[in-house]
Image (cartoon, rainbow, N blue to C red):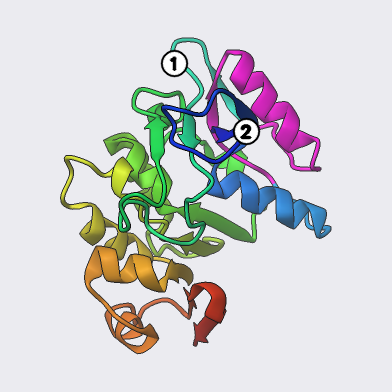
Amino acid sequence: MVTFLPSRPGRLADVPSFDRAIGGAESNVACVLAAAGHRVRWVSRVGADGFGDHLVAAIAAHGVDTGHVARDPHRPTGVYFRTAGERATGADGEEPGTAEVVYYRAGSAASAMTPRSPGPAALAGARVLHLTGITAALSDSCLDVLRTLTRRTPGRPLVSFDVNYRVGLWQGRPQGPETLLDLARGADVVFVGEDEAAAAWDLHGPEAIRAALPEPGVLVVKQGSEGVTVLH
């Protein structure tokens, strides 16, 4: 996904220009891990368009293997616009007026992913598989992908799951919070913001979140400026 950031503070209606950047929680994690010296492969689907060209090239420039990124000739690369006020770890929409976030991901190339794509070759040799709830929100077929990958099967890689509850992506689908909770229960390591757990599940504090998620071996609760709480 390509992100557009405003050139100056202000409402989206008033900002005259935007700077283009790599977007997407998974691709950001991939770039950081590659910079730390790990072998990383990013598996996704982008449009056969200029934004797709930019995204693949920019991520590859960070040392990430992009050889299993599919190009879709019929659907565009997803994009989104946000103001500088968005809280990086929070669920958007909980504090009206502090940020504007607009997604253009419905019908995008990534939304067309299915359990058959990525195929087994894309995941061959993986020791850790990192997923996020944002992918699950894109379409029913993307949700099927995550359900398949979080199924507890013998020999699967360690599964890391960042909840990333985004209200704007689940509009019209009230089952979103429960769906994310089910996916998290299938993971080995779960990351969730304390504020998004409150917004999605009405759970307050690390212990309450852990009580609802006993299955993962490690639970990391992100608490903004207070740091994180790790529960084993």
The answer to whether residue 32 shows anywhere in this view is yes
Within the image, what quadrant is residue 9 found in?
A: top right
Q: How many residues crowd mark 2 within 10 Å: few (<14), some (14–19), many (20+)?
A: some
The amino acid sitting under disc 2 is Ser
Q: Is residue 178 left or right of residue 6?
A: left
Q: Position of residue 76 (x, y in %)?
A: 47, 17
Which residue is label 2 attached to? 7
Which residue is label 1 attached to? 75
Q: Secondary structure at mark 1?
A: loop
Nearer to me, 13 or 61: 13
Q: Residue, x 48% and y 57% (percent of image)?
A: 87
Return the residue found at the far right: 37
Q: How many marks?
A: 2
Q: Residue, x 42% and y 24% (percent of image)?
A: 108
- Magenta includes 143? no
Q: Position of residue 4 (x, y in %)?
A: 56, 32
Q: Residue, x 39% and y 33% (percent of image)?
A: 103
Q: Which residues are magenta?
A: 41-68
What is the C-alpha distance between the residues marked 1 and 2? Answer: 28 Å
- Magenta includes 50? yes
Q: Position of residue 18 (x, y in %)?
A: 59, 28
> In front of the other: label 1 or label 2?
2
- The image shows residue 152, relative to residue 103, as above or below, that is below
Q: Position of residue 186 (x, y in %)?
A: 37, 66
Nearer to me, 117 or 1: 1
The answer to whether residue 185 shows anywhere in this view is no
